[in-house]
């Protein structure tokens, strides 16, 4: 999206239906070519598929995809999202190999004074016979580890700080875009800001007795959304140095867009707001109720029902 341009907005995905796995590439090709031919080729800020869907309608777009692919969508089958993010640590695959997911804050694989992350991965690579996989959550998977190599690889990972048992659930779920000094679109800090901001939020979580819980926090340096702030329970969108729009009310599983709660405020103002709200959540939440769900239920923010029409309704102060 673009600050000040209400013709731009974030948007959740649309469900077309169920397809068997062998038809996936045919459907993907049909979606891409339909967007190529139907998308707005004259206005870059309106060129994404989400705007095409809004303009022509989901059913019309779906029918064109079916025509091009020769595949008819079945009815949507029941499913449930139970979590998002990566499961940090060891997981066993169906092939009896093990996969080690390493938390890499903001995806920055460098040697730091307290943790030589890059060197550690290089040392693992010297003995690892499987592969390395990047995740969509900025982490790294050491994949295809046989049982007899698990202990050796974990020992190397711990030696170089790639495994840190002190990392909190909140930090594991936090994410930022690169922003300054790399991105020319940046308006505010994101990656360099996130560690200290997370430290402060962790202290608030401890203060209110919910340190074992997590809140999905995202920070982006501009409204283009590379850090996925518009799928967060707490989303910060940069406007100027130490100035952010604060969005609240997404959910843990990433199926609700957060509403703007305050516009163009400082990080200290954001911390003060979150201190109060986290305190209320800690006391009054229902069993297993996420932070964003609590804010919706208690009318701190109204849910975004259709981002094309109501995303820019700013929540009134309560």
Image (cartoon, helix red, strand yellow):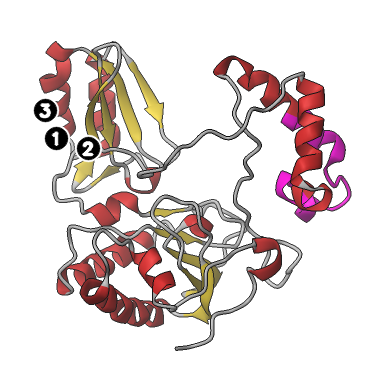
Question: What residue lies at 55% left-to-right and 19% top-to-bottom?
Answer: 21
Q: Is residue 136 above or below residue 57?
A: above
Local packing at callout 1 (Cα closer than 10 Å; few below 14, some 14-19, many 20+) is some
Q: Is residue 214 above or below residue 309?
A: above
Question: What residue lies at 71% left-to-right and 48% top-to-bottom?
Answer: 50
**Whole-percent x, y for residue 116 in the image:** 23, 39
CA distance for labels 1 and 2: 6 Å
Q: Which residue is mark 1?
A: 158
Local SS, label 3: helix
Q: Quadrant of residue 140?
A: top left
Q: Is residue 22 left or right of residue 236?
A: right
**Whole-percent x, y for residue 144 in the image:** 29, 16
Q: Nearer the viewer, residue 222 or 232?
A: 232
Q: Are marks 2 and 3 in contact (CB under 8 Å)?
A: no
Q: Which residue is mark 3?
A: 155
Question: What residue lies at 40% left-to-right and 76% top-to-bottom?
Answer: 267
CA distance for labels 2 and 3: 10 Å
Most frequent secondary structure within the magenta stretch = helix
Q: Which residue is mark 2?
A: 162
Highlighted magenta segment, given as a residue range: 31-51
**Which tag, 2 or 3, sits closer to the chain's start?**
3
Residue 87 lies within the magenta run: no
Q: Are marks 1 and 2 in contact (CB under 8 Å)?
A: yes
Q: Nearer the viewer, residue 298 or 34?
A: 298
Local SS, label 1: helix
């Amino acid at each position: 999206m673009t600050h000040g341009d209400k013709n731009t907005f974030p948007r959740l995905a649309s469900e077309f239906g169920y397809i068997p796995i062998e038809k996936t590439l045919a459907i993907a090709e049909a979606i891409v070519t339909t967007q190529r031919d139907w998308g707005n080729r004259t206005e870059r800020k309106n060129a994404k598929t989400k705007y095409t869907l809004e303009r022509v309608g989901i059913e019309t777009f779906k029918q064109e995809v079916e025509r091009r692919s020769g595949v008819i969508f079945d009815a949507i089958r029941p499913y449930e999202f139970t979590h998002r993010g990566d499961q940090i640590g060891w997981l066993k695959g169906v092939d009896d190999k093990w996969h080690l997911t390493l938390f890499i804050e903001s995806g920055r694989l460098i040697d730091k004074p307290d943790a030589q992350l890059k060197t550690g991965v290089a040392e693992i690579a010297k003995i690892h016979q499987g592969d390395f996989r990047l995740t969509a959550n900025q982490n790294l998977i050491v994949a295809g580890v046989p049982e007899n190599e698990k202990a050796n690889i974990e020992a190397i990972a711990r030696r170089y700080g790639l495994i840190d048992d002190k990392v909190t659930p909140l930090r594991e779920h936090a994410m930022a875009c690169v922003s300054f000094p790399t991105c020319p679109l940046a308006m505010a800090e994101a990656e360099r800001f996130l560690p200290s901001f997370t430290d402060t939020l962790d202290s608030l979580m401890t203060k209110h007795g919910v340190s074992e819980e997590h809140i999905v926090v995202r920070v982006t340096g501009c409204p283009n959304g590379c850090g996925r702030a518009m799928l967060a329970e707490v989303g910060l969108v940069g406007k100027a140095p130490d100035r952010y729009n604060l969005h609240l009310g997404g959910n843990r599983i990433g199926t609700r867009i957060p509403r703007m709660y305050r516009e163009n405020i400082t990080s200290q103002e954001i911390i003060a707001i979150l201190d109060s709200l986290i305190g209320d959540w800690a006391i009054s939440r229902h069993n297993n109720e996420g932070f964003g769900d609590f804010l919706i239920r208690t009318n701190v923010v109204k849910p975004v029902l259709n981002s094309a029409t109501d995303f820019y309704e700013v929540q009134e102060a309560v």
